[in-house]
Amino acid sequence: GHAFMGSAVIQTLWSEAPPASRRAFAGHAEAAAMARDPWDALYAARDLATPSSYPVLNQGVDQLAPPRFLAGAGSCETLHSFPFDHRAAALGVGEHPLAPWFYNILLANFGDRRLLQDFMRRVALGTAVTVGSLGSSITHGAGVNAKQGGMIFNDVVVRWLNRFFPSSGNGTSHKLVLFETGTINFQAVDLLIVDVFINSKDAIMMEELLRGLLLADSKVRPAILAVAWFRNKHTMHKEMSGPELAKWDAEWFTRCNFEKELNPTFQYYGIPVISFKNALFKLGLTKEDAVRTVFSSDLVHPNDLGHAFMGSAVIQTLWSEAPAASRRAFAGPADVVAIAGDPWDALYAARDVATPSSYPVLHQGVDQLAPPRLVLEVGDILRLAGVG
């Protein structure tokens, strides 16, 4: 128990060490740790559905129970590196594991993971599955340069499933189905990836969709996962001027997508939400760095590397819910290559560690480097966190 507590503290310190220092320790010893994880028994003990005092993790629906409304939440675990296509990753068009501390920044909502666990359990058994992707331009490939080998993020996910968890049924394979908002038949979908945060703030439509899916017969409930991309700050600089532009610049972090409008609905229904704006905050402020890394030239859509990054975040979420035996089966020295040649190093420096966020549990009112001053009374802090 003390070793476990100490390990949690060490992992926090390790996440803040210089990247060069972390890479210097990458070696076979770390792969051995993956193969013989002393915390396996603890991973099964995590809290997936009981009430939590952290508002950003709160959910209102038990996804596996008969239709009724409960409060519940999840808690994060340390993730192991998933197996990946080294060649595609080296070219910037394929999946690659994210540093666990960085992945945790992406989690706007941990959610109820039991349907995802059931999905990955079936995948690990060799069952052919259908992945549905609901969205608009990003879902349909905006920003992808297919001639250069680029792939849409949802294609990256399905390719990964077919490569490392192939179906065992008579030559069948996992497949992808693309949807746009409207009247949709999800009956044959095993996993639904939702990507609507740039284009829609219609919380009523989203609530009706989620309620219809999760309050249906338990035999046809798909696992659901949401991804939230965002607009670069400069996207409106040609269209606005004067006070209007000043207002956009001041409110950009909130207005760069519609998480503020949609997240409460996803939180209530226990849907995991992967948000990129906190992690890539600094890339949202500049043109040059954004295009050099994960944004396409329009500064709205992800480029090839951006789609690979989105796909990698989805894969890491699925991997975290795969059966422990399946994860151990892939642990080995090859995984360490991910640490030694990480394509996301430039992104790690872009994370948001000091600016205000719309996520209550991440919000801070004190600049740690400024002279001490009292910003909020304790009671105010508790009320802001939803526990006072």
Image (tube, helix red, strand yellow):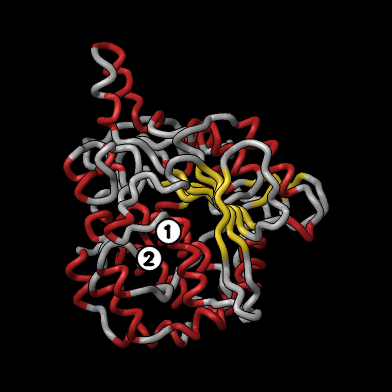
Q: Amino acid at mark 1?
A: Gly
Find residue 18 and report its image quarter. Answer: bottom left
The residue singled out by tag 1 in the image is 311
Residue that appears at 72% across and 49% down: 214
Q: CA distance from mark 1 to mark 2?
A: 6 Å
Q: Residues within 10 Å of mark 2 (few under 14, many from 20)?
A: many
Residue at image position (63%, 66%) is 129
Secondary structure found at label 2: loop
Measured as percent of width and height from the top left, residue 128 is found at: 63, 71
Examine the image and state in which quarter residue 88 appears.
bottom left
**Left or right: 62 with respect to 365?**
right
Residue 308 visible in image: yes
Q: Which residue is mark 2?
A: 95
Query: Vertical placement of 117 versus 217: above or below?
Result: below
Question: 112 and 184: which one is in front?
Answer: 184
The spot of residue 176 in percent (x, y) is 55, 59
Alpha-carbon neighbours of circle 1 within 10 Å: few (<14), some, or many (≥20)?
many
Left or right: where 78 falls relative to 61: left
Closer to us: 211 or 76 = 211
Residue type marked 2: Glu
Which percent across, then down, holds residue 70? 74, 47
Q: Position of residue 132 (x, y in %)?
A: 59, 54
Q: Quadrant of residue 218?
A: bottom right
Q: Do the residues bearing badges 1 and 2 touch, measured as CB atoms within 8 Å?
A: yes
The residue at 32%/18% (across/down) is 247
